[in-house]
Image: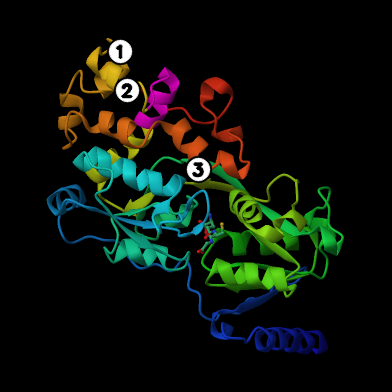
Amino acid sequence: MRNRFILLLTVFALIVSACGSDAEEATTTTAGGDTTETTAGGGGDTDTGGQTDGGDLLDVVLERGELNCGVNETLPGFGSRDTDGNLVGFDVDLCRAVAAALFGDSEAVRYEPLTASARFEAVNSGLIDLLSRNTTWTQSRDTDLGLDFAPTTYYDGQQLMAKASDGFSSGSALSDIEGATVCTNAGTTTEKNISEAASALGVNITLQTFEDFDIVMENFKSGACQVVTTDGSGLISRKASDPEGTDWVVFPEVPISKEPLGPAYAQNNSRFGDVVRWTIFAMLIAEEAGIDSTNVADAQANPPNDEIGRLLGGEGELQTAMGIPTSAFFDVISQVGNYAESFDRNLRPLGLERGLNALWSDGGLLYPPPAR
Ligand SMILES: N[C@@H](CCC(=O)N[C@@H](CS)C(=O)NCC(=O)O)C(=O)O
Protein backbone atom coordinates (compact mmCIF):
# COMPACT_ATOMS: atom_id res chain seq x y z
CA MET A 1 0.00 0.00 0.00
CA ARG A 2 2.77 2.38 1.06
CA ASN A 3 4.75 1.47 -2.10
CA ARG A 4 1.71 2.12 -4.21
CA PHE A 5 1.29 5.53 -2.63
CA ILE A 6 4.95 6.44 -3.28
CA LEU A 7 4.62 5.26 -6.88
CA LEU A 8 1.50 7.36 -7.43
CA LEU A 9 3.21 10.37 -5.86
CA THR A 10 6.23 9.90 -8.14
CA VAL A 11 4.04 9.69 -11.22
CA PHE A 12 2.10 12.76 -10.16
CA ALA A 13 5.28 14.73 -9.42
CA LEU A 14 6.72 13.83 -12.80
CA ILE A 15 3.60 14.85 -14.66
CA VAL A 16 3.56 18.16 -12.80
CA SER A 17 7.28 18.74 -13.37
CA ALA A 18 6.80 18.01 -17.07
CA CYS A 19 4.17 20.74 -17.20
CA GLY A 20 5.90 23.39 -19.20
CA SER A 21 4.34 24.61 -22.37
CA ASP A 22 4.01 20.99 -23.50
CA ALA A 23 2.57 19.71 -20.26
CA GLU A 24 -0.52 18.24 -21.80
CA GLU A 25 1.62 16.25 -24.22
CA ALA A 26 3.73 14.52 -21.58
CA THR A 27 2.98 11.01 -20.42
CA THR A 28 4.90 9.40 -17.58
CA THR A 29 5.24 5.74 -16.78
CA THR A 30 7.32 4.14 -14.08
CA ALA A 31 8.77 0.83 -15.16
CA GLY A 32 10.87 -1.75 -13.45
CA GLY A 33 9.98 -4.93 -11.60
CA ASP A 34 6.52 -3.30 -11.48
CA THR A 35 5.18 -1.47 -14.51
CA THR A 36 2.52 1.20 -14.21
CA GLU A 37 1.12 3.01 -17.19
CA THR A 38 -0.59 6.37 -17.34
CA THR A 39 -1.91 7.83 -20.53
CA ALA A 40 -2.38 11.49 -21.30
CA GLY A 41 -2.45 12.96 -24.77
CA GLY A 42 -0.35 11.34 -27.43
CA GLY A 43 -2.47 8.63 -28.89
CA GLY A 44 -1.06 5.50 -30.35
CA ASP A 45 -2.07 2.22 -31.80
CA THR A 46 -5.80 2.69 -31.53
CA ASP A 47 -8.05 0.72 -33.86
CA THR A 48 -9.65 3.19 -36.21
CA GLY A 49 -10.99 0.61 -38.62
CA GLY A 50 -9.91 0.61 -42.24
CA GLN A 51 -10.51 2.71 -45.31
CA THR A 52 -13.25 0.91 -47.14
CA ASP A 53 -15.18 3.46 -49.19
CA GLY A 54 -14.18 5.78 -52.02
CA GLY A 55 -13.46 3.01 -54.57
CA ASP A 56 -10.28 1.21 -55.49
CA LEU A 57 -7.36 3.21 -54.14
CA LEU A 58 -5.23 2.82 -57.27
CA ASP A 59 -8.02 4.20 -59.48
CA VAL A 60 -8.71 7.04 -57.05
CA VAL A 61 -5.04 8.08 -56.96
CA LEU A 62 -4.56 7.79 -60.74
CA GLU A 63 -7.68 9.85 -61.32
CA ARG A 64 -6.46 12.50 -58.86
CA GLY A 65 -3.07 12.72 -60.57
CA GLU A 66 -1.20 13.24 -57.31
CA LEU A 67 -0.06 10.96 -54.48
CA ASN A 68 -0.91 11.96 -50.92
CA CYS A 69 2.06 10.79 -48.92
CA GLY A 70 2.49 10.94 -45.14
CA VAL A 71 6.07 11.60 -44.02
CA ASN A 72 8.24 12.66 -41.12
CA GLU A 73 9.66 16.18 -41.38
CA THR A 74 11.82 16.03 -38.28
CA LEU A 75 14.13 13.11 -38.97
CA PRO A 76 17.16 14.07 -41.10
CA GLY A 77 18.05 11.28 -43.50
CA PHE A 78 14.51 9.83 -43.56
CA GLY A 79 12.33 12.93 -43.83
CA SER A 80 13.25 16.56 -43.19
CA ARG A 81 13.36 19.98 -44.88
CA ASP A 82 16.37 21.09 -46.91
CA THR A 83 17.57 24.71 -46.88
CA ASP A 84 14.94 25.59 -49.50
CA GLY A 85 12.17 24.09 -47.39
CA ASN A 86 11.73 21.03 -49.63
CA LEU A 87 11.11 17.66 -48.04
CA VAL A 88 14.00 15.26 -48.62
CA GLY A 89 15.08 11.88 -47.28
CA PHE A 90 15.00 8.14 -47.76
CA ASP A 91 11.28 7.82 -46.88
CA VAL A 92 10.48 10.90 -48.97
CA ASP A 93 12.27 9.25 -51.91
CA LEU A 94 9.79 6.38 -51.72
CA CYS A 95 6.87 8.83 -52.13
CA ARG A 96 8.69 10.31 -55.14
CA ALA A 97 9.41 6.86 -56.58
CA VAL A 98 5.78 5.73 -56.29
CA ALA A 99 4.64 9.00 -57.92
CA ALA A 100 7.13 8.40 -60.74
CA ALA A 101 5.72 4.89 -61.25
CA LEU A 102 2.11 6.12 -61.17
CA PHE A 103 2.33 9.34 -63.16
CA GLY A 104 5.83 9.47 -64.69
CA ASP A 105 6.46 12.45 -62.41
CA SER A 106 8.26 12.16 -59.10
CA GLU A 107 7.06 15.66 -58.20
CA ALA A 108 3.38 14.70 -58.29
CA VAL A 109 3.21 14.31 -54.52
CA ARG A 110 1.31 16.20 -51.84
CA TYR A 111 3.23 15.67 -48.61
CA GLU A 112 1.52 15.42 -45.26
CA PRO A 113 4.01 15.80 -42.38
CA LEU A 114 2.83 13.58 -39.52
CA THR A 115 3.78 12.85 -35.94
CA ALA A 116 4.06 9.22 -34.89
CA SER A 117 0.74 9.22 -33.07
CA ALA A 118 -1.19 10.91 -35.89
CA ARG A 119 0.09 8.67 -38.69
CA PHE A 120 -2.34 5.71 -38.61
CA GLU A 121 -5.47 7.83 -38.37
CA ALA A 122 -4.17 9.72 -41.43
CA VAL A 123 -4.21 6.45 -43.40
CA ASN A 124 -7.56 5.29 -42.11
CA SER A 125 -9.30 8.62 -42.70
CA GLY A 126 -8.04 8.69 -46.29
CA LEU A 127 -6.01 11.87 -45.66
CA ILE A 128 -3.02 10.04 -47.14
CA ASP A 129 -2.70 7.20 -49.64
CA LEU A 130 0.73 6.08 -48.52
CA LEU A 131 2.50 6.31 -45.17
CA SER A 132 6.26 6.47 -45.62
CA ARG A 133 7.50 7.46 -42.19
CA ASN A 134 9.91 5.17 -40.32
CA THR A 135 7.04 2.88 -39.40
CA THR A 136 7.59 -0.55 -37.88
CA TRP A 137 5.62 -3.47 -39.31
CA THR A 138 3.95 -5.18 -36.35
CA GLN A 139 1.26 -7.82 -36.03
CA SER A 140 -1.38 -5.54 -34.52
CA ARG A 141 -0.78 -2.73 -37.00
CA ASP A 142 -1.04 -5.21 -39.87
CA THR A 143 -4.04 -7.16 -38.64
CA ASP A 144 -6.04 -4.96 -36.30
CA LEU A 145 -5.41 -1.39 -37.37
CA GLY A 146 -6.70 -1.34 -40.91
CA LEU A 147 -3.27 -1.27 -42.56
CA ASP A 148 -1.32 -3.35 -45.02
CA PHE A 149 2.48 -3.16 -45.19
CA ALA A 150 4.69 -3.05 -48.26
CA PRO A 151 8.10 -4.77 -48.03
CA THR A 152 10.53 -3.54 -45.41
CA THR A 153 12.76 -0.82 -46.83
CA TYR A 154 15.02 -0.42 -43.76
CA TYR A 155 15.79 -3.10 -41.16
CA ASP A 156 16.37 -1.34 -37.86
CA GLY A 157 16.42 -2.03 -34.13
CA GLN A 158 15.71 0.04 -31.01
CA GLN A 159 18.69 1.44 -29.11
CA LEU A 160 19.47 3.81 -26.26
CA MET A 161 21.43 7.07 -26.23
CA ALA A 162 22.84 9.05 -23.29
CA LYS A 163 25.52 11.68 -22.64
CA ALA A 164 29.23 11.01 -22.24
CA SER A 165 29.28 13.96 -19.85
CA ASP A 166 26.87 12.00 -17.60
CA GLY A 167 29.38 9.16 -17.45
CA PHE A 168 27.99 6.97 -20.22
CA SER A 169 30.30 5.47 -22.81
CA SER A 170 30.27 3.38 -25.94
CA GLY A 171 30.36 0.38 -23.58
CA SER A 172 27.16 1.32 -21.71
CA ALA A 173 24.11 -0.94 -21.68
CA LEU A 174 20.49 -0.99 -20.56
CA SER A 175 21.61 -2.56 -17.28
CA ASP A 176 23.56 0.68 -16.52
CA ILE A 177 20.57 3.03 -16.48
CA GLU A 178 18.97 2.07 -13.14
CA GLY A 179 16.85 4.98 -11.86
CA ALA A 180 17.09 7.00 -15.10
CA THR A 181 14.31 8.95 -16.72
CA VAL A 182 14.03 7.60 -20.27
CA CYS A 183 12.23 9.58 -22.95
CA THR A 184 10.70 8.68 -26.29
CA ASN A 185 7.72 9.63 -28.38
CA ALA A 186 4.13 8.53 -27.96
CA GLY A 187 2.33 6.15 -30.27
CA THR A 188 5.44 4.13 -31.07
CA THR A 189 6.66 0.59 -30.70
CA THR A 190 9.55 2.17 -28.82
CA GLU A 191 7.59 3.08 -25.69
CA LYS A 192 6.29 -0.47 -25.34
CA ASN A 193 9.63 -2.19 -25.99
CA ILE A 194 11.60 -0.19 -23.43
CA SER A 195 9.16 -0.96 -20.60
CA GLU A 196 9.29 -4.65 -21.47
CA ALA A 197 13.08 -4.77 -21.78
CA ALA A 198 13.64 -2.86 -18.51
CA SER A 199 11.19 -5.08 -16.64
CA ALA A 200 12.84 -8.21 -18.00
CA LEU A 201 16.19 -7.04 -16.63
CA GLY A 202 14.69 -5.75 -13.37
CA VAL A 203 16.00 -2.26 -14.14
CA ASN A 204 13.88 0.56 -12.68
CA ILE A 205 13.30 3.44 -15.06
CA THR A 206 10.82 6.26 -15.39
CA LEU A 207 9.47 6.47 -18.91
CA GLN A 208 8.26 9.79 -20.25
CA THR A 209 6.67 10.06 -23.68
CA PHE A 210 5.91 13.14 -25.75
CA GLU A 211 3.90 13.51 -28.91
CA ASP A 212 6.66 15.46 -30.63
CA PHE A 213 10.16 14.03 -30.93
CA ASP A 214 11.66 17.55 -30.92
CA ILE A 215 10.31 17.89 -27.36
CA VAL A 216 11.86 14.53 -26.47
CA MET A 217 15.22 15.87 -27.62
CA GLU A 218 14.77 19.20 -25.79
CA ASN A 219 14.18 17.27 -22.57
CA PHE A 220 17.21 15.10 -23.24
CA LYS A 221 19.39 18.15 -23.87
CA SER A 222 18.16 19.97 -20.76
CA GLY A 223 18.87 16.89 -18.64
CA ALA A 224 15.21 16.27 -17.74
CA CYS A 225 15.69 12.88 -19.42
CA GLN A 226 19.02 11.15 -18.98
CA VAL A 227 18.35 8.60 -21.71
CA VAL A 228 16.51 8.78 -25.02
CA THR A 229 15.41 5.70 -26.91
CA THR A 230 14.04 5.05 -30.39
CA ASP A 231 15.03 3.30 -33.64
CA GLY A 232 18.84 3.16 -33.91
CA SER A 233 18.68 5.10 -37.17
CA GLY A 234 16.66 7.84 -35.47
CA LEU A 235 19.25 8.22 -32.71
CA ILE A 236 22.11 8.36 -35.20
CA SER A 237 20.19 10.88 -37.30
CA ARG A 238 19.68 13.19 -34.31
CA LYS A 239 23.25 12.78 -33.06
CA ALA A 240 24.69 13.53 -36.51
CA SER A 241 22.55 16.61 -37.09
CA ASP A 242 22.85 18.35 -33.71
CA PRO A 243 25.88 20.44 -32.68
CA GLU A 244 25.61 18.99 -29.14
CA GLY A 245 25.63 15.45 -30.60
CA THR A 246 29.38 15.02 -30.10
CA ASP A 247 28.63 14.45 -26.39
CA TRP A 248 26.04 11.75 -27.07
CA VAL A 249 26.72 8.02 -27.15
CA VAL A 250 24.49 5.40 -28.76
CA PHE A 251 24.75 2.22 -26.69
CA PRO A 252 26.24 -0.49 -28.88
CA GLU A 253 24.40 -3.44 -27.38
CA VAL A 254 22.27 -5.70 -29.54
CA PRO A 255 19.14 -3.67 -30.30
CA ILE A 256 16.37 -4.28 -27.77
CA SER A 257 13.86 -4.98 -30.55
CA LYS A 258 13.45 -5.69 -34.25
CA GLU A 259 12.13 -2.64 -36.11
CA PRO A 260 11.42 -3.52 -39.74
CA LEU A 261 10.55 -0.11 -41.20
CA GLY A 262 8.53 0.30 -44.36
CA PRO A 263 5.57 1.92 -46.07
CA ALA A 264 1.95 1.17 -45.25
CA TYR A 265 -1.44 1.91 -46.82
CA ALA A 266 -5.10 1.19 -46.09
CA GLN A 267 -5.83 -2.53 -46.11
CA ASN A 268 -7.67 -4.26 -48.98
CA ASN A 269 -6.06 -2.12 -51.68
CA SER A 270 -3.94 -4.78 -53.30
CA ARG A 271 -3.63 -3.08 -56.73
CA PHE A 272 -2.24 0.04 -55.09
CA GLY A 273 -0.10 -2.20 -52.88
CA ASP A 274 1.29 -3.94 -55.97
CA VAL A 275 2.54 -0.61 -57.32
CA VAL A 276 4.24 0.28 -54.03
CA ARG A 277 5.73 -3.20 -53.73
CA TRP A 278 7.09 -3.34 -57.26
CA THR A 279 8.45 0.18 -57.06
CA ILE A 280 10.59 -0.99 -54.13
CA PHE A 281 11.54 -4.21 -55.93
CA ALA A 282 12.44 -2.29 -59.11
CA MET A 283 14.83 -0.09 -57.10
CA LEU A 284 16.44 -3.22 -55.62
CA ILE A 285 16.60 -5.17 -58.89
CA ALA A 286 18.19 -2.15 -60.58
CA GLU A 287 20.84 -2.06 -57.86
CA GLU A 288 21.48 -5.80 -58.29
CA ALA A 289 22.04 -5.25 -62.01
CA GLY A 290 24.17 -2.10 -61.63
CA ILE A 291 21.51 0.07 -63.25
CA ASP A 292 21.20 3.56 -61.79
CA SER A 293 19.96 7.01 -62.75
CA THR A 294 23.12 7.70 -64.77
CA ASN A 295 22.96 4.65 -67.07
CA VAL A 296 19.27 3.72 -67.15
CA ALA A 297 18.63 5.66 -70.37
CA ASP A 298 21.34 3.63 -72.15
CA ALA A 299 19.87 0.43 -70.77
CA GLN A 300 16.43 1.41 -72.02
CA ALA A 301 17.82 2.31 -75.47
CA ASN A 302 19.53 -1.11 -75.71
CA PRO A 303 17.35 -3.25 -73.47
CA PRO A 304 19.00 -6.45 -72.31
CA ASN A 305 16.95 -9.63 -72.75
CA ASP A 306 16.48 -10.11 -69.03
CA GLU A 307 14.49 -8.72 -66.12
CA ILE A 308 16.06 -5.27 -66.52
CA GLY A 309 14.82 -5.22 -70.13
CA ARG A 310 11.37 -6.22 -68.88
CA LEU A 311 11.33 -3.72 -66.00
CA LEU A 312 12.31 -0.91 -68.35
CA GLY A 313 9.39 -1.68 -70.67
CA GLY A 314 10.62 -4.59 -72.80
CA GLU A 315 7.43 -6.52 -72.03
CA GLY A 316 5.22 -3.54 -71.38
CA GLU A 317 2.23 -5.61 -70.39
CA LEU A 318 3.98 -6.46 -67.12
CA GLN A 319 3.41 -2.86 -66.12
CA THR A 320 0.21 -2.09 -68.01
CA ALA A 321 -1.47 -5.13 -66.42
CA MET A 322 -0.80 -3.38 -63.11
CA GLY A 323 -2.57 -0.24 -64.33
CA ILE A 324 0.59 1.84 -64.72
CA PRO A 325 2.54 2.97 -67.82
CA THR A 326 5.04 0.71 -69.60
CA SER A 327 7.79 3.17 -68.65
CA ALA A 328 6.84 3.24 -64.94
CA PHE A 329 10.05 1.73 -63.57
CA PHE A 330 12.29 3.52 -66.04
CA ASP A 331 10.78 6.72 -64.60
CA VAL A 332 11.48 5.52 -61.05
CA ILE A 333 15.15 4.80 -61.71
CA SER A 334 15.80 7.83 -63.91
CA GLN A 335 14.07 10.31 -61.58
CA VAL A 336 14.79 8.88 -58.11
CA GLY A 337 17.52 6.27 -58.62
CA ASN A 338 18.03 2.71 -57.43
CA TYR A 339 17.99 1.66 -53.74
CA ALA A 340 21.73 2.26 -53.28
CA GLU A 341 21.50 5.77 -54.71
CA SER A 342 18.75 6.71 -52.27
CA PHE A 343 20.62 5.13 -49.35
CA ASP A 344 23.88 6.85 -50.29
CA ARG A 345 22.23 10.23 -50.83
CA ASN A 346 20.23 10.24 -47.59
CA LEU A 347 21.57 7.83 -45.00
CA ARG A 348 25.27 7.37 -45.62
CA PRO A 349 26.02 11.04 -44.82
CA LEU A 350 24.70 10.35 -41.29
CA GLY A 351 27.24 7.56 -40.92
CA LEU A 352 24.76 4.71 -41.46
CA GLU A 353 26.17 1.62 -43.18
CA ARG A 354 24.21 -0.86 -45.27
CA GLY A 355 24.53 -3.71 -42.71
CA LEU A 356 21.27 -5.70 -42.73
CA ASN A 357 20.12 -3.38 -45.50
CA ALA A 358 22.61 -4.73 -48.01
CA LEU A 359 21.40 -6.84 -50.91
CA TRP A 360 21.16 -10.58 -50.16
CA SER A 361 24.08 -11.10 -52.55
CA ASP A 362 26.21 -8.89 -50.25
CA GLY A 363 25.13 -10.66 -47.08
CA GLY A 364 22.10 -8.47 -46.30
CA LEU A 365 18.36 -9.13 -46.08
CA LEU A 366 17.16 -7.37 -49.23
CA TYR A 367 15.97 -10.01 -51.71
CA PRO A 368 13.55 -8.80 -54.40
CA PRO A 369 11.54 -11.43 -56.28
CA PRO A 370 12.13 -11.73 -60.04
CA ALA A 371 10.50 -9.34 -62.51
CA ARG A 372 8.92 -11.74 -64.94
N1 LIG B 1 9.60 2.80 -35.74
C1 LIG B 1 8.87 3.14 -34.55
C2 LIG B 1 9.20 4.55 -34.06
C3 LIG B 1 8.84 5.61 -35.05
C4 LIG B 1 9.07 7.04 -34.57
O1 LIG B 1 8.13 7.82 -34.50
N2 LIG B 1 10.30 7.41 -34.27
C5 LIG B 1 10.65 8.74 -33.80
C6 LIG B 1 12.09 8.83 -33.51
S1 LIG B 1 13.12 8.20 -34.78
C7 LIG B 1 10.30 9.80 -34.78
O2 LIG B 1 10.12 9.56 -35.93
N3 LIG B 1 10.23 11.01 -34.32
C8 LIG B 1 9.97 12.15 -35.10
C9 LIG B 1 8.59 12.68 -34.87
O3 LIG B 1 7.77 12.04 -34.19
O4 LIG B 1 8.30 13.72 -35.44
C10 LIG B 1 7.38 2.98 -34.80
O5 LIG B 1 6.98 2.73 -35.94
O6 LIG B 1 6.60 3.08 -33.85
Residue 157 placed where, x, y %? 62, 47
How much space separates mark 2 and mark 3, taking CA atoms? 21 Å
Viewer-closest of 189 and 49: 189
The local secondary structure at tag 2 comes to helix
* Dot 2 alpha-carbon crowd within 10 angstroms: few under 14, some 14 to 19, many 20 or more: many
The single residue placed furthest to the right in the displayed view is 167
Indicate the quadrant where residue 123 lies.
bottom left
Amino acid bearing label 1:
Asp
Residue 316 placed where, x, y %? 17, 24
Asked whether, in this view, residue 213 is left or right of residue 81, the answer is: right
**CB atoms of marks 2 and 1 within 8 Å:** no
Q: Name the residue that disc number 2 marks.
A: 296
Residue 226 placed where, x, y %? 76, 68
323 versus 1 height, above or below? above
Residue 247 placed where, x, y %? 77, 57
Q: Which residues are magenta?
A: 282-292
The single residue placed furthest to the left in the displayed view is 63
Prevailing SS of the magenta stretch: helix
Q: Quadrant of the C terminus?
A: top left
> Is 128 included in the stretch rendered in magenta?
no
Q: Earlier in the sequence, mark 2 or mark 3?
A: 2
Amino acid bearing label 2:
Val
The local secondary structure at tag 3 comes to helix
Q: Nearer the viewer, mark 2 or mark 1?
A: 2
The local secondary structure at tag 1 comes to loop
252 versus 354 height, above or below? below
- Which mark is drawn over residue 346? 3
- Rendered residue at 38%/31% (across/down): 283
Q: Nearer the viewer, mark 3 or mark 1?
A: 3
Asked whether, in this view, residue 108 is left or right of residue 195, the answer is: left
Q: Name the residue that disc number 1 marks.
A: 306
